[in-house]
Amino acid sequence: MNTTNRDLLVTNLEKSFGDFRAINSISLTIRAGEFLTILGPSGSGKTTFLNLVAGFLDCDGGTMTLGDRDITHLPPETRDFGMVFQGYALFPHLSVFDNVAFPLKVRKWSSDKIARHVEEALDLVQLGNLRDRMPKQLSGGQQQRVALARAMVFRPNLLLLDEPLSALDKKLRAEMQEELKRLHRKVGLTFIYITHDQDEALSMSDRVVVMRNGVIVQEGRPDELYKTPRTSFVAGFLGRSNFLRGDVISREGEELTIRNGDITLRQHAGAATLEPGNTVLIALRPEAVSLIEGDVQADNVIEATVSDSNYFGSNFSITAKTDHFGTFELTKPAAQLSHDLAAGSRIRLGWSASAGVIVEDDE
Amino acid sequence: MATTGTSAAHAQNSPGRLTVNSIMGSEGRYWLLIAPAVLLMLGFYFYPLARVLWMSFTFPTPGLGNYEDLIDNASVHRTLITTARIGVITTGLTLIFAYLISYVLVHAKPKVERIMFLGVLIPLWISALVRGFSWFILLRREGTINDVLIGTGIIDTPLDLIWNELGVVIGMVHYMLPLGVLPIYANMRNIDTRCVAAARGLGASRGVAFRKVFLPLSMPGVIGAGILVFIYSLGFYVTPALLGGGKTLMIAEYIQLQIMDLVNWGRGAMLATTLLVTILLLLGVMSRIIDLRGLFGGK
């Protein structure tokens, strides 16, 4: 099978609603077989993007090609994309079997071929025993599985999932995340998954695309995005970050010296091209900050006052008021914590020059 | 169970005193509130109605004599057939137009939808008499439509658009349209538009998605509207009397003729009974097939 030939290539896609530019020149390659997540807050354009790919909306500009086929202006029914809707959109007047058989019936498959494939799809989502039920007799998780079976039964070119887990409770959501990953591995279909939930994006995807205000802010593997966010928005939306602002006063190779008031910080430049005089924003993950005790050395050390400390079983989350950088958040494994961290106690926070990431300020 | 329990306990606590609760249970006081309405209905509606129905068996002589007309009276036959035919045609046409209007309404932009909806409702607030006479102005031989058609040279002699079955059907469809639109529209409003989108995404063309998803989902509204309009049509009086010109007699006008002009109370009462029983039978049959309570918003 020639997999590269089934990549979906999106080039300079545009869509406006009146004066509002919902999608602003998006280009993206979706590789055949990958689990791609489009992550963004509401209003970021991610659902519009999905509707453009599915063909429910017609784009104002740009092109979309699947392999060597131009699909830019094709009606949705000819694209052969499976879609799982937010709220499932099962046909309430049809049984589970007929719901799943729908895409095959409109393709005019023979009835025994339909029966065989529907059984297979229902078995795949472990619903073989509920084929005669009506949608309203099913639980949310079961409806979700029917929607998945229906979207995959006709062997679509790719599967579009629009926040499919948002209506489920926390436990069921975790179960369905596993289920989706299992299905993805098993059927080898391209998944385009839309969500505003950063945990889903990080745990499930091969690649994450972060969208905001109709443009792609950053794309990459989940760990890449987490470790090296490009902008302050990505650093704050994907996981949590502390932000430190300062002026570059000198540069020696990779190492920058940054000053804010009477505090001097050491920071690796990373990919950033910076010179003395530039103002920079550093994003620092809560788990990268240490509590400094005694005469332990660290590249950067600042003082702070604990304002709150929350216990989460495996770890503590501590909020502290720093003298120069506002409120800081740090997390520590509960087992490592020997300090008295009552509100009001003074602590020293430290981190290495390579722990922070210089990000573009886009908030 | 709980009700009888509390009322029994209550009766024990106050021996010898007859309270509303001790007689009717704790819900009794609510029944008292609507008792005046119930009494009015019984005295001024059901009693005379029952008398009329009873008259069909007793006047002028006791027995089923009046009902023999159903079998062997040609003018009764003609009236019944005309009524059924006009009822069916009116219902069919009303449903088609009401469906189209509702479809456009639910797919229109909210602002346009509000204006269009007003257009559906306003006729409902205008008396059938006024609407009948308005059609009279448009449809008669020297009316607006014939004037325009002759003036532009499309026809030489005026068309007979009124004082026949065509006129009755035009007037009745117009009258029934809001009654048809309301249930269909209400039902279409509740159809999840994502279902249609899902059908498209799963490979159905616009037409197939409509036929296999939207149409079946809108059927409860269509059936509800159909029952409402058909029953209304069967007993309709004003519009057929105005636009039928005495030649197209439907059952309501025929009953009026029998009682007011021919003073034939027996036949009039018999036909009224027949109409009532037919409608009840229709509702009975339909309720076996479909969920009427759901249709008329009963749950």
Image (cartoon, rainbow, N blue to C red):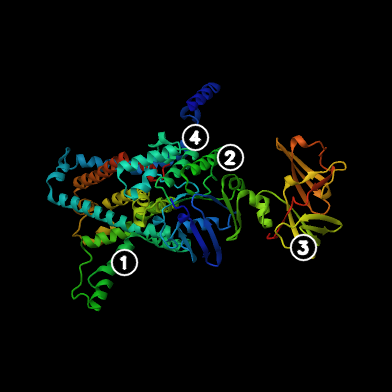
| Cα distance between the residues tagged 4 and 1 | 50 Å
The residue that label 2 is drawn on is A170
- Front residue of B273/B226: it is B226
Pointer 4 chain? B
Q: Give whichever of discs 3 and 2 has the lower sequence position.
A: 2
Q: Nearer the viewer, mark 3 or mark 4?
A: 3
Classify residue A362 as left or right of residue A101.
Answer: right
Q: Which mark is residue A279?
A: 3
Classify residue A206 as left or right of residue A143.
Answer: right
Q: What residue sits 26% from the left and 51% below the top? A: B234
The residue that label 4 is drawn on is B29
Q: Amino acid at mark 1?
A: Ser
- Residue A263 seen from this side: yes
Q: What residue sits 61% from the left and 45% below the top? A: A199
The residue that label 1 is drawn on is B134
| Cα distance between the residues tagged 3 and 4 | 78 Å
Numbered disc 3: secondary structure: strand
Q: Amino acid at mark 3?
A: Thr
| Cα distance between the residues tagged 4 and 2 | 48 Å
Q: Classify A55 as above or below A318.
A: below
Classify residue A256 as left or right of residue B171.
Answer: right
Whole-percent x, y for residue A118 in the image? 38, 41
Q: Amino acid at mark 2?
A: Lys
Numbered disc 1: secondary structure: helix
| Cα distance between the residues tagged 1 and 3 | 79 Å
Numbered disc 4: secondary structure: helix
Pointer 1 chain? B
Q: Are marks 4 and 2 in contact (CB under 8 Å)?
A: no
- Front residue of B178/A96: it is A96
